[in-house]
Each structure stands twice: as C-alpha cells, then as structure tokens.
Amino acid sequence: MTRSPRGAGLRKDAGMVEFTGMVPLILVTVLLVWEGFLLGMSATYAGHAANEGARIAAVHGDYGQVKSAAVERIFGVWADEENIEVHYPTGRVCDPDQVPQVDKDCGYVRVTIEPPLLFPGVLLPMEVSSRTRVVYEGEQ
C-alpha cells in the first residue's frame, strides 16, 4: 500500500477559501449592476419628463406649466426638485435677429437629472439628460 505525499490531496476547506476570495468580486459586480439600474432609471425618467414637457409646450404652455408637467412625471428618489433641471428656451434667446448665438435647445425641452449613487441622498457627480422636440400645434 502506497501513501500519497503530504499535501497532494485536496483539502476539505478549499472551496470555502475560494469562495471567500471571490466575495469582494461578487459584491463589486452586484454594486455595479445596481448602479447601472439607477442610471437607466434616471435616463428613463428624464426621457418621460422631457416628453411630457414637450407635450405641454406644444399646446402653448408657458415655462412654469412645462416645468410642472415635467417634474410630475418623475418619481421616487429622482423626484427631488433640487436635482431636476428643466430647460425650455423661448422668446428673445431663440430669435436670430436678437442674439448672435441662438440657444441650441430652441424648440426642445431638455430635462436633466442628477442620478443617485447606490442609495438616496448621495448623488453621482454627473447628470443624465434627455431632450425632446416640441411639435407645435396650431398657430405659432
């Protein structure tokens, strides 16, 4: 009968050691997937809000009505009005005879949201933005 050399066999706790080594990688992956979800939701809310703002602007809504309608389409941790910017330029800034450089968002509603970082209250140092063209109805 021959004996195997010392250490040549598998240790009973080898699987536990490998799993413990993988835990940080698994946690980082889960956190990255969660943050990707939060960024996707931010883009979705910004898109819906810009669409709603453009709909109100199309029936001759003023800036206050456009902003109110856009903000109402945003829910959850994204709904903090301090983190939402609605841009709907009209009037003088859109007239090429009045200003040398016309605002690039003339005829559009742009909604910008600061997305959360992993949980509410902490924001990413970036913005997610969506822009929707206003299709005016009736006379302009």
Image: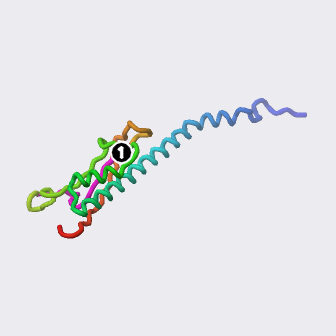
Residue 16 place in picture, x, y as percent: 67, 34
Dominant SS type (magenta):
loop
Residue 21 place in picture, x, y as percent: 60, 35
How many residues crowd around disc 1 within 10 Å: few (fewer than 14), some, or many (20 or more)? some
Q: Which residues are magenta?
A: 100-115
Name the residue located 24 percent from the left edge and 52 percent from the top edge: 87
Q: Quadrant of residue 76?
A: top left
Q: Please indicate whether residue 139 sits to the left or right of residue 16 in the image.
A: left
User: Which residue does the numbered mark 1 point to in the structure image?
Assistant: 79
Residue 138 place in picture, x, y as percent: 21, 70
Q: Which colour style is shown?
A: rainbow
Q: Quadrant of residue 59?
A: bottom left
* Residue with the most extreme left position: 98
Quarter of the image with the C terminus in it: bottom left
Front residue of 114 and 17 = 114
Name the residue located 10 percent from the left edge and 57 percent from the top edge: 99
Q: Secondary structure at mark 1?
A: helix
The question of residue 71 being in magenta is answered with no
